[in-house]
Amino acid sequence: MKSIDLDDRGVVVTCPKCGQRNRLKYDKLDQAGRCGKCGTELHAPAEPIDVAKDLVFDALTSRSALPVLVDFWAPWCGPCKMVAPQFAKIAKEGAGRWIVVKVNTEESPTLARRFRITAIPTMVLMRNGLEMARQAGALPAERIRQFVEQAKQ
């Protein structure tokens, strides 16, 4: 069982203390939640989350209280593999300020078409269902962070 999943209502996380699955609603990701079983404080994920379904992607990007940094990638793409650890760093650094998701363009071709992804990796920053900024190419974590910070302003 994965420790983090998405559904159309929120991010489903596993409590690190008791193992209970809890949903953090998208519109409250900027706030700490509590485990329904043991009361442990839960926060927005500090790691990239895979998104495979259009409905879930739309729910997250339109309702999230935090900006959503989307990494469009493919498993056969060398630069995508190289930049994956950089997105992991950015997810950890930005926990509580933004959320990072990964969209495999091979598994979600409709999302790739809808966003007119013509080169990978491509990152898109979303807020309230709208694209705020886009950048193609593999970048180091520092440049990804700058991209997010500048686009959020």
Image: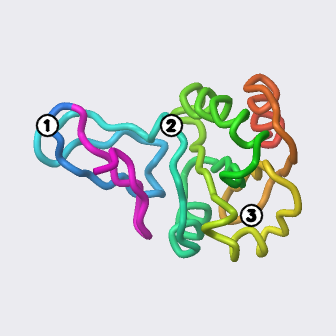
Q: Is residue 64 left or right of residue 130?
A: left
Q: Is residue 57 left or right of residue 126?
A: left
**Front position among marks 1 and 3:** 1
Residue name at image x 41 percent, y 60 percent: 10
Which numbered tag is attached to residue 47?
A: 2
Which residue is labeled 3 in the image? 130
Identify the image quadrant of residue 150. Answer: top right
Residue 79 % position (x, y):
79, 39
Q: Tell me how far mark 3 sits from mark 2, CA to CA.
A: 22 Å
Q: Residue at x 36, y 38 (%)?
A: 32
Q: Kindly identify the amino acid type of the residue bearing the numbered disc 1.
A: Cys
Do the residues bearing badges 1 and 3 touch, measured as CB atoms within 8 Å? no
C-beta proximity under 8 Å, tags 2 and 1: no
Q: Nearer the viewer, mark 3 or mark 2?
A: 2
Please give the label number shown on residue 125: none
Q: Nearer the viewer, residue 119 or 60?
A: 119
Quick one: label 1, few (<14), some, or many (20+) residues within 10 Å? few
Viewed as shown, does residue 65 lie left or right of 79?
left
User: Looking at the picture, how far across and down is residue 146, in whole percent?
Assistant: 81, 29
Q: Amino acid at mark 3?
A: Leu
**Residue situated in front as seen by the camera: 128 or 14:** 14
Range covered by the magenta-colored residues: 1-16
* Circle 3 residues within 10 Å: few <14, some 14–19, many ≥20: few
Comes first in the chain, label 2 or label 1: 1
Q: Residue furthest front?
A: 76
How much space separates mark 1 and mark 3, taking CA atoms? 37 Å
Q: Image check: 111 left or right of 17?
A: right
